[in-house]
Image (cartoon, rainbow, N blue to C red):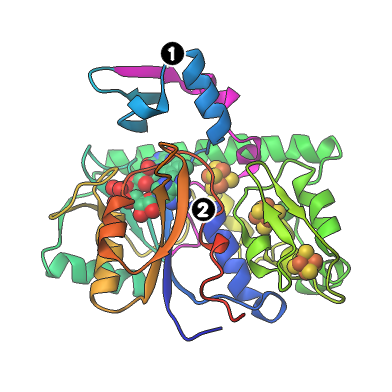
Amino acid sequence: MINEKIAIVGTPCQILAASKINYYEKETGGSPIDLKIGLFCMENFSYTYLKMFLKEKNMNLNDVKEFRIENNKFKVFLEDSVQEFSIPQTNSFKRKNCDICTDYTSNLADISVGSVGSPKGYSTVIIRNEKGDKIVQDLISNNLVSEIYAEENALDLLKKISNKKINNNLKNIKNRENNSHPVIYKRKVSDNEITELSNECQFDCLNSDVISEGACVLCGACEFVCPIDIIQINERKPVKKGTCKEGCHACYYACPRTFINDKILPKDLDIKPLGEYLKIYSLKSNNNTGQDGGIVSEILLYLLDKELADSVFIVGEDADNPWKPIPKLTSSKDEVLKAKGTKYSTVPIIFKSKLFRKQ
Ligand SMILES: Cc1cc2nc3c(=O)[nH]c(=O)nc-3n(C[C@H](O)[C@H](O)[C@H](O)COP(=O)(O)OP(=O)(O)OC[C@H]3O[C@@H](n4cnc5c(N)ncnc54)[C@H](O)[C@@H]3O)c2cc1C
Ligand code: SF4
Ligand code: SF4
Ligand code: SF4
């Protein structure tokens, strides 16, 4: 691994994948991910099915200025109108694996950011550790961001929404398990059991335990850690193109939907809707706009400016396919600014790039 520091932005499942890769460094080869900025996330959409849905409603992705989920509605902003859909209407393009996810606020990130809990134009920022706190304190003291008081009732709403996700999806997990469809990442297992079970598993087990069970979040961690590059991720799922290396179990260890011990993901987080945290802020950037307060982009620019990260992973947009997310490792501030805004579709983030892995 080259000596480089990377910051990533991702949904809670992607942040979990990054945490697992680094925790099981011996088995996976690790990564240079040094700072994790997690987004709040209720669900994610399939790009193909979202496109089909919009076509049925006589809309074209080329004409969409912005997508936004607010006040229990999925909103599509066009040049001079806004189309609104109820959340159940998004079921036709929602990824089904999201039904078994119980993390709303990116519990394992250093800093978590979302819109719920703050007024329009501001981001709710949850600081989870000293490292995250130092960065945000610097942004405030350098006048790069403005802070307003995080209202108690807005935070209550955030907790309520998070609890709703946790409770609904715990029920879905129970149903899947009762119907012989394993959700193994939520099972209670000891370190020894994890080692014993995972050391018997290669890609074929990952396929039967996660991918075929509709639990794959398409994070790309398996593809990233494969030492012989035989995993490829297409629009729908990871596939293996070759024969596994003897004694390798890297993909099974890295996957956020295989066994996870309590040290990586404490099970009691399911009764803490906002996870473990030090502080919560409502912030907006003083220099840039963004999906909400532009805080994610402001943090990334700060990290590059102060050389706290050599490069950052962002999710930009495909030049030929509007709103199709494209992951990118960059040290360009222009590219960070271009990537602002939310693309509500899954993409194997960070991991797609092998730029920083030793060949
Ligand atoms: C799939 C998804 C679902 C979300 N659901 C909720 C929700 O239910 N409630 C809520 O409060 N907030 C949700 N968010 C977060 C919210 O939309 C904003 O991303 C967040 O508030 C940060 O806003 P900002 O203005 O600070 O970010 P900006 O400064 O606009 O930066 C946005 C950053 O997000 C990254 N990004 C964009 N799309 C993706 C993607 N698909 N995957 C990974 N990274 C991406 C970009 O690289 C960019 O750096 C969701 C985000 C995503 C991607
Ligand atoms: S599994 Fe779905 S709901 Fe959970 S964090 Fe990932 S994209 Fe969001
Ligand atoms: S060699 Fe096989 S077991 Fe190892 S990471 Fe690649 S696909 Fe997985
Ligand atoms: S199978 Fe691969 S892409 Fe899917 S969740 Fe697991 S690591 Fe991520």
Q: Which residue is mark 1?
A: 58
Marks 1 and 2, the one that precedes in the sequence: 2
Q: Is residue 331 left or right of residue 108?
A: left
Q: Depth check: 91 or 315 in front?
A: 315
Checking the image for residue 12, the label placed there is: 2
Residue drawn 84% across the image and 34% down it: 179
Which contiguous range is marked in magenta?
A: 82-109
Q: Depth check: 353 or 266 in front?
A: 353
Q: Residues within 10 Å of mark 1 (few under 14, many from 20)?
A: few
Indicate the secondary structure of the residue bearing disc 2.
helix
Q: Is the residue indicated by label 2 positioned so its CB lies within 8 Å of ligand 2?
A: yes
Query: As drawn, which residue projects farthest toward the front?
Result: 320
Amino acid at pointer 2: Pro
- Compared with residue 337, is residue 358 higher up or lower down, i.e. above or below? below
Query: As drawn, which residue projects farthest toward the bottom?
Result: 3
Amino acid at pointer 1: Asn
- Compared with residue 129, is residue 270 higher up or lower down, i.e. above or below? above
Image spot of residue 165 (x, y percent): 54, 38
Image spot of residue 297 (x, y percent): 28, 57
